[in-house]
């Protein structure tokens, strides 16, 4: 917070406030102020003209409030055991004028004049938006931990207080609210200030005078009729402005009064004679015309009021949809905004004048725009998290429309969990594939070993040199020739391929006993890419 050396209430203070969005204006900006409409704040900020304050309000409200605040400060200082200093500070384009702040700045003091309802709310620990938006801005600007909110008349007898701490989400809503207010301020065109509409009746009709004996002796009925018809014809039935409505409602009452006067004149004439046909028919004709005009005006007023209400609601709804469409455009095709609730019909309920209807609808529109902008900012933050953390794993997030509506912390945790689960599953698949390939390779080596492992045959023994044979007696039998021995042929049969591999590794057999199927190995590397891993095999760049 940047502290400004200005005295609250001074000209320098007013000049400083004109360049910032102040904490005391925050409730009006949020459409929650009991004292100022949002459109009035827009007008004041656009024109630089504040509302005039009467001497009575200045003396009995503002000055008296400052006196009570000054008297309440030492009471609170005794209770908390710390001094409180008035401070004016800014942060960015926000300003807060603090009734009091402790030396270390962790605790603030805000004072409001005593009233029974506010005192009851303070004792209950609940505050209206009219109060808490100001406190939220004070906390945001100052960085304090809490505000001690006091309602008093400056005495110990009427002194209640409560501690207010920042409510999660309100500060973000406040910032979004000022952002939307700034956008509305750029497009705002101050409307001409019109006095409150007061209805007017047509010009007064002459007093109807009828005197009868046995016949009509004196009457201005024909002139009265002509004047009445002209007045009725002059009544406007095209209702657009507050003035039109005020006039129409006044003229409805006027028509009713004329009907009553005609009926009274008729009854007066009846009291003087039993039958004057022309007189009565004329009075009946005038009365019927006045009644017709009154009923017409009543229907027109009712229908036009309903039409204007519907137009205001529809215009506000269209403006909100335009705002949402702009946010969707900024999101591209990556995500879409959800529906943003807005109760325009409820907002204008109970409002009478056109200006109050429009102000209520505009305030609800601003609230809905603020909510929509916050949702849009949240979606953008979530999309950024997806790009940052899951650029190579977007196939895991086909439900992106639902995911971007989550809180960012929850989404980040979900992104990491899905990627981790996917990597674990891929590692399990890769390990299973490596195990399968290892077994296939061992089986291939075993099969090749069986096919090639043939032991060379043993060399044939030379035939023994025969000893000289002595001549046998002629009578001796002829001996059988000696049998020749068959050579023994051996071949190796691999019964434990893993043991053979260990024998080669231990130097007990030459490496040539084992062969490598390079085609299979290259295919395995091509399939797994950089994830390839195998004991005894190093992955190198083929271009090297």
Image (cartoon, grey):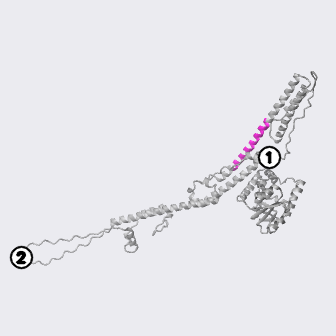
Q: Secondary structure at mark 2?
A: loop
Q: Which mark is residue 128?
A: none
**Secondary structure of the magenta portion, mostly?**
helix
Residue bearing the label numbered 2: 473
Q: Earlier in the sequence, mark 1 or mark 2?
A: 1
Residue 89 locus on image (x, y percent): 79, 63
- Which of these two is toward me, 501 or 462? 501
Residue 218 locus on image (x, y percent): 94, 24
Q: Residues within 10 Å of mark 2 (few under 14, many from 20)?
A: few
Q: Which residues are magenta?
A: 299-323
Residue 288 locus on image (x, y percent): 83, 28
**Residue 300 in magenta?**
yes
Q: Tell me how far mark 1 sits from mark 2, CA to CA.
A: 157 Å
From the viewer's perspective, is residue 242 above or below residue 412? Answer: above
With 243 as the anchor, is 213 left or right in this view? right
From the viewer's perspective, is residue 291 above or below residue 538? Answer: above
């Amino acid at each position: 917070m940047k502290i400004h050396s200005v005295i609250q209430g001074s000209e320098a203070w007013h000049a400083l406030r004109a360049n910032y969005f102040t904490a005391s204006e925050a409730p009006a900006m949020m459409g929650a102020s009991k004292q100022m409409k949002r459109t009035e704040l827009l007008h004041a900020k656009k024109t630089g003209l504040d509302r005039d304050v009467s001497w009575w309000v200045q003396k009995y409200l503002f000055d008296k409030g400052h006196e009570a605040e000054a008297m309440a400060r030492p009471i609170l200082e005794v209770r908390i055991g710390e001094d409180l200093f008035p401070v004016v500070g800014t942060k960015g384009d926000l300003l807060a004028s603090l009734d009091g702040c402790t030396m270390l700045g962790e605790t603030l003091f805000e004072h409001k004049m005593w009233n029974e309802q506010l005192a009851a709310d303070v004792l209950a620990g609940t505050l209206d938006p009219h109060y808490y938006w100001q406190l939220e801005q004070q906390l945001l600007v100052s960085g304090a931990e809490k505000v001690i909110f006091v309602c008093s008349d400056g005495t110990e007898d009427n002194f209640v207080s409560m501690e207010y701490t920042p409510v999660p989400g309100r500060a973000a809503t406040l910032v979004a609210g000022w952002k939307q207010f700034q956008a509305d301020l750029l497009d705002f065109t101050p409307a001409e200030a019109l006095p409150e509409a007061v209805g007017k009746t047509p010009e007064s009709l002459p007093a109807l005078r009828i005197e009868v004996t046995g016949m009509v002796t004196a009457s201005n009925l024909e002139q009265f009729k002509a004047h009445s018809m002209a007045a009725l014809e002059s009544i406007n039935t095209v209702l657009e402005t507050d003035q039109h409505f005020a006039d129409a409602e006044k003229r409805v009452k006027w028509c009713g009064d004329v009907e009553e006067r005609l009926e009274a004149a008729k009854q007066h004439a009846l009291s003087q004679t039993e039958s004057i046909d022309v007189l009565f028919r004329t009075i009946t004709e005038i009365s019927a015309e006045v009644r017709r005009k009154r009923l017409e005006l009543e229907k027109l007023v009712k229908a036009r009021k309903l039409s204007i209400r519907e137009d205001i609601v529809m215009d506000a709804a269209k403006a909100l949809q335009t705002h949402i469409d702009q946010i969707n455009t900024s999101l591209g095709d990556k995500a879409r905004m959800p529906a943003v609730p807005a109760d325009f019909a409820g907002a204008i309920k109970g409002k009478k004048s056109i200006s109050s209807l429009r102000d209520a609808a505009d305030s609800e529109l601003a609230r809905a725009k603020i909510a929509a902008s916050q949702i849009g900012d949240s979606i953008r933050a979530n999309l950024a998290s997806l790009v940052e953390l899951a650029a190579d794993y977007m196939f895991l997030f086909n439900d992106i429309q639902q995911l971007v509506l989550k809180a960012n912390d929850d989404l980040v945790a979900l992104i990491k969990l899905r990627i981790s689960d996917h990597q674990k599953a891929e590692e399990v698949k890769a390990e299973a594939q490596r195990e399968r390939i290892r077994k296939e390779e061992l089986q291939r080596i075993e099969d090749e070993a069986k096919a090639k492992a043939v032991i060379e045959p043993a060399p044939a023994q030379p035939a023994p040199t025969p000893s000289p044979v002595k001549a046998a007696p002629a009578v001796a039998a002829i001996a059988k020739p000696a049998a020749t021995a068959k050579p023994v042929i051996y071949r190796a049969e691999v019964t434990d391929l893993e043991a053979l591999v260990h024998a080669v590794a231990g130097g007990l057999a030459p490496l040539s006993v084992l062969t490598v199927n390079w085609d299979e190995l290259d295919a395995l590397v091509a399939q797994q890419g950089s994830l390839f891993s195998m004991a005894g095999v190093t992955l190198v760049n083929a271009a090297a």
